[in-house]
Amino acid sequence: MTALVVAMDGPSGSGKSSASRGVARALGLRYLDTGAMYRAMTWWMLEHGVDITDPAAIADRAAEPELVIAVDPDAPGITVDGVDVSAPIRTQEVTSVVSAVSAVPEVRARLVAQQRDIIGEGDIVVEGRDIGTVVAPGAPVKIYLTASPEARARRRTAELTGTTVETQQADMARRDALDSTRKADPLVMAADAVELDTTELNLEEVISEVLRLVKERT
Ligand code: DC
């Protein structure tokens, strides 16, 4: 029997992070936030003055940063070249350009390889955009979380300061368009994923629905 891998994909604000951590905790599994890895790569590019508008410049440096990511759902964190970047990767500066960095195939190839290494034998909940389609296509449980644009923007705004629901909704629409139309591993639902619309659900309801699906499929 293959060990458990729960693939949790979907756009930002769909409730992926809280739900993924909650499911990992409930089942005693590890937790991998692949978005944090794309954010850390982006932070490093900005820090090293790489021209974010130039995909070739990003590709040239993609092999350099050393990322180490924690897989404890109670203590997630990430370092790049030994620097703890858990907080700086959540800034607007990184958020506004992460789509450009994550569209570069050399960046994706490197991070997907590292993600597969970490997943290893399984017993892990993995959240991202391409987990069920590219990183772990054999995962026995694949969930695709969605929510209405308003609900997603409302959630994101509540996590941030100095922004409005309207600004967040516009920014998300722009990032969704970039993430869904890029050539390398675009955000699409896997054919065998279960779609879960979280618009009308609270966190506990989302977690218990995912736990039910895990039980049903394993
Ligand atoms: O989930 P997040 O907002 O932290 O992700 C940040 C960005 O990283 C997002 O714009 C898309 C990208 N990403 C990706 O391309 N593939 C993944 N598996 C995870 C994130």
Image (cartoon, helix red, strand yellow):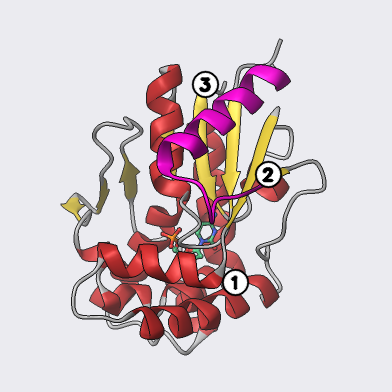
Q: Which residue is mark 1?
A: 179
Mark 1 vs mark 3: which is more N-terminal?
Answer: 3
Left or right: where 75 falls relative to 153 = left
| Relative height, residue 217 to residue 112 (above, below) | above
Q: Is residue 198 magenta?
A: yes
Q: Residue at x 57, y 21 (%)?
A: 121
- Name the residue nearer the viewer: 116 or 162: 162
- Residue shown at 48%/76% (left/top)? 172
Circle 2 SS class: helix
| Residue at (54% x, 80% y) in the render | 173
**Quick one: SS at disc 1?**
helix
Structural crowding at the residue carrying mark 2, measured as other residues with C-alpha within 10 Å and reported as few (<14), some (14–19) or many (≥20):
many
Percent coordinates x, y for residue 144 in the rendering: 64, 48
Of the image marks 2 and 3, the number of the one nearer the N terminus: 3
Q: Are marks 1 and 2 in contact (CB under 8 Å)?
A: no
Q: Residue 5 location in percent, x, y?
A: 59, 28
Marks 2/3: CA–CA distance: 15 Å
Q: Residue furthest right?
A: 191
Q: Is mark 1 within 8 Å of ligand 1?
A: yes
- Residue 197 painted magenta: yes
